[in-house]
Image (cartoon, helix red, strand yellow):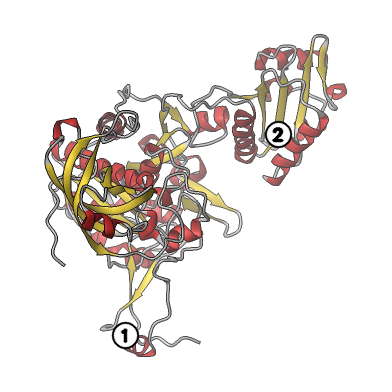
Amino acid sequence: MKFNKRTHTCGELREDNIDQHVVLNGWVDTRRDLGGVIFIDLRDRYGITQVVFEPTFNQSAHEIGKDLRSEYVISIEGKVRRRPAGTENPSIPTGFVDVMVEKVVILNKSLTPPFQIKDKLDVHEDIRLKYRYLDLRRKEMQDNIILRHKMYQSARSYLGANDFIEIETPVLMKSTPEGARDFLVPSRLHRGRFYALPQSPQQYKQLLMVSGFDRYFQIVKCFRDEDLRADRQPEFTQIDLEMSFVDSEDVYEMMEGLMKRLFKDIKGYDLQVPLPRLTFDEAMEKYGSDKPDLRFDLEMVTLNEIFEETEFKVFKDTLNNNGIITGLLAAGCGDYTRNQLDVLTDFVKKLGAGGLIWMRVKEDGLEAPIAKFLSDNEKSELKRKLNASAGDLIFILSGPRLKALSIMGSLRLEMAKRMNLIGDNIEPKLVWITDFPLLEWDDETHRYYAMHHPFTSPNLEDLELLSDDPGKVKARAYDLVYNGNEIAGGSIRIHDAKLQGKMFDALGISNEEAETKFGFLMNAFKYGAPPHGGIAFGFDRLAMLFANQDSIREVIAFPKTSSGMSLMDESPSIVDESQLKELHIKIK
């Protein structure tokens, strides 16, 4: 099938091109037959150009034009003209010209697509994923993928200019515990042995620091076999970085520069740095989350001091058990009905709260089921502490510290939605969260787990607590949060084999287990490991936020469903018995 290569894309022609002879290639977007004259909107990823088949201009081209249907791939040759007065389309860049077709070649026909190739598509996501190659023809999807490409380019340019070296790390590695379930790959050559797909390049990038590459980065695929959500996939992409001879301040400064560059290149926005910081404890007490959304104020307030002498049993028991009493003021919501308050009570109960205390603020005091149990001084201090006025609504939760704060944080977000506090044009809010606990206790297994990973350095002033009271040790760890979404996390690493051994002891990892799982890294530390630290950005989530989408599937070319299925190629799939036999695997 002979056709001429295009001279222009479908988004390129302007009034300067009038009277030029051009060749366009693309897909038939729409077809309109107006009394014999056929108008085709020809589409490629650059845009749309209207082409015209007129029998008096070229009869043979017009005859072929009659057969054209949606999504046919065609090549046309013709002459650019100014659109007749009144037919211009100023909503598209090519809308003041069209092309009179002299020759057309059908390069490929198409079946009728299962959905229209248009934006704002109202079709079930499973259909879109099954026919992803069609879904990706839509402009909004192509814009998302192009935005992702620009983010790649911007990040690489910034990091390269700051002496980072891009180094690939293995995709087949040793299975090591990093907080999630590994994907395992059986070895054909080594019977009964398995590779794992990396959950992150964590150990490799630390080894690169030992190797003397003081600034490493990689835009890398990572794999976790875990339950999925809208912002999770079994395979995901990170911007992975590591730096030698640095402390936390160096990481903050370098990454703020990266974010400033990305916001400028991608969004045209001048991000102001340095970014604000909150400790983990501050974030939890004020916002009930270690990834707080700061686009609205609505801060929580700790009320323990007010109720130190209280006779109200619920509060007294909470304080005696070292718990927390936290309050939230919903300004102007004092007219909420009992039904609305019952809905909010059910909301927090589903999250694990025993109940929700609410108080309407009136001119003459507080109206609440528990008001009779509180002293006049406690009521007045409560209003003062929360800065409450008549017409406001007060919420109070009490209980174990992190649990109560987390539930109130969820109520905070719910009230922000109900109060319409998050507008469309609010500027982005980024914040560093610092001073995380190094370890978290698990009641089921009765042991500590690393809150980040086992290679995170404790705060040096807390080293003595690591053996005596590990729950109080803070980590030299940090997360970067953007509009309530964690987009990056990292830490200063342990670079001393002796300190790493203490960390393993605190985690209940024996010397034998440590040698089996991490021996190669521990041995490397014995040969002069520099102080180092790093961070990893969740690239898919960052792209999702830059593209103003609600799911990372909208910015990944070929994503999986929420159950980990690829509907397009029907994977995971059954494999031949012969393949299983080669891998020494038998399915029961």
Q: Position of residue 486 (x, y in %)?
A: 43, 40
Q: Would you identify the image quadrant in which residue 254 lies? A: top left
**What kind of element bears circle 1?**
loop
Residue at the far top in the pictured view: 363
* Dot 2 amino acid type: Ser
The numbered dot on residue 398 is 2
Q: Earlier in the sequence, mark 2 or mark 1?
A: 1
Direction from residue 87 to residue 342 in the image, left or right? right
Q: Nearer the viewer, residue 10 or 139?
A: 10
* Dot 1 amino acid type: Arg
Q: Nearer the viewer, residue 583 or 135?
A: 135
Residue 368 in sight in this render: yes
Residue 509 in sight in this render: no
Residue 127 vs 262, above or below: the answer is below
Q: Give the residue at mark 1.
A: 191
Q: Residues within 10 Å of mark 1 (few under 14, many from 20)?
A: few
The residues bearing labels 2 and 1 have C-alpha atoms spaced at a distance of 55 Å
Q: Nearer the viewer, residue 586 or 354?
A: 586
